[in-house]
Structure formats: C-alpha cells, structure tokens
Amino acid sequence: MHVRELAIPDAYVFTPVQHADERGVFLEFYRFEALASAVGHSLDLRQGNISVSQRGVVRGVHYALVPPSQAKYVHAPTGAFLDIVVDIRVGSPTYGRWESVLIDDVDRRGVYLAEGLGHVLVALSDGATASYLTSAVFDPEREKAINVLDPELGIEFPFDRDALRLSPKDLEAPGLAEAADLGLLPTWDECKAYYDSLRTA
C-alpha cells in the first residue's frame, strides 16, 4: 500500500495494490499497521458508516469538537467522489486551506483525516457509495459544520454551483470566520496535544 501525506498536516492518502485476473480484483482497502506507521498511532475503530449519493450531492464541511472529535478513513467501494480535506484548526500553518483527492472504484484510494479537520464529499457519479471508518461514534451535540460555499474557503467544484445539492443543515452552516468568532473551531494546539496523547496511550 502506497501512503502519501497531503499538504495539510495529519491527512493522508492510501493507494492499495490491486490484484486482478480473469475472475476479478482483490485488494486490501485498509491496513491498520500502514495507517499506524503513517500517523503514529492506530485507528481506534468505533463506527462504520455508508452513504450513497447522487451526482452533485455535497456532504460537508463536517467536523466534530476536540476532544475526542472523530478521525475518519474514507473510501469509495462504488462510484466516484471528490474527497476534500479542509484545515479548520485555528493556528495551524495551513489554516483555511483545502486539498482534494479523487476516490473511486478504479484506483480505490482511501483518505485518512485526523481529528479536528473538516471533511467534504462531492459525488461525481449517480449512486456513488462512500464507506467511513471512524474513531468515535456519532454525537449530535459535538458534530458541527461550516458552509462549504463560504467564499473565504474558495473550494473549487468540478461542476457548476447550480448543480450542487446540499442539505438544509449544510446550507445554513456558518462560514469559517463566523465559526471562529463563535468559538466553534478546534485549535491547532488542542489538536496537536490530542494527537500526542493518542501516540503515547
């Protein structure tokens, strides 16, 4: 499995080796020791989620309060997504920046994002399926969102904004600056302290 860290610290792309023959394809979409070697600790798996989306559906920018927040390992068993990681950690050297990765059923990449990072999925095909392995169970009291259309973020989409399909909750989410002013964003220091605690646990 090939591992690459994104320009945003604490986010990684995992590209599996695929074994194909006349019967089909076999691959390991997740290996705990590959992830642990990259991030310095294993993923304490607490929940697995599946979402199915039509083309143009946008989910995010989603995150959870730190600690414990929610680390995620995301891949696409079928279809294709633009997986976007957004650094919303106040004080981070890449605060406010984003980076995208194509995850699909061709290269079958997986994306890991640490606790405190924002996450967006943009469905590029109808019936696209995303699988999430997470380090914490869903907690509606700690789950937050930032408006993915916030001009300050400047996220670039693969098609016209008129074609994007967002939930009412995501459309009503505050922008990055408003969320920061309200004290809703994690800080770089608290995230790094939490990552260190996971590495020494």
Image (cartoon, grey):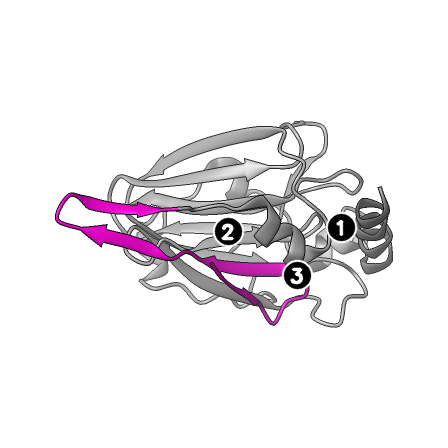
- List the residue tagged with mark 3: 87
Residue sitting farthest toward the left: 22
Q: Residue at x 56, y 42 (%)?
A: 172
Cα–Cα gap, marks 1 and 3: 10 Å
The mark nearer the N terminus, 2 or 1, is 2
Describe residue 33's horizontal placement relative to residue 100 as left or right: right
Count residues near mark 3 (Cα–Cα under 10 Å), then give few for <14, some for 14-19, many for 20+: many
Q: Is residue 158 magenta?
A: no
> What percent of the width, then of the height, locates residue 136?
67, 32
- The residue lying at 34 percent from left, 42 percent from top is 77
Q: Secondary structure at mark 3?
A: loop
Mark 1, other Cα within 10 Å: few <14 / some 14–19 / many ≥20: many
Residue 157 locus on image (x, y percent): 40, 63
Quarter where residue 129 is shown:
top left
Please state the horizontal and vertical placement of residue 181, each as a whole percent of the image.
80, 54
- Mark 1 or 3 closer to N-term? 3
Residue at coordinates 49% horizontally, 58% vertically from top-left?
Answer: 14
Q: Residue at x 64, y 55 (%)?
A: 175
Q: Determine which of the numbered discs, if any, sits on residue 148 in the image.
A: none
Mark sitting earlier along the chain (3/2): 3
Q: Which residue is mark 1?
A: 185
Q: Amino acid at mark 2?
A: Val
Magenta stretch?
A: 1-27
Asked whether 14 or 132 is in front, the reply is: 14
Quadrant of the image containing the C terminus: top right
Q: Secondary structure at mark 1?
A: loop
Mark 2 lies on residue = 120
Q: Is residue 129 visible?
A: yes
Tell me residue 117's x, y (percent): 66, 53
Q: Which residue occupies the foreground of this view, 196 or 122? A: 196
Q: Amino acid at mark 3?
A: Asp
Predominant secondary structure in magenta?
strand
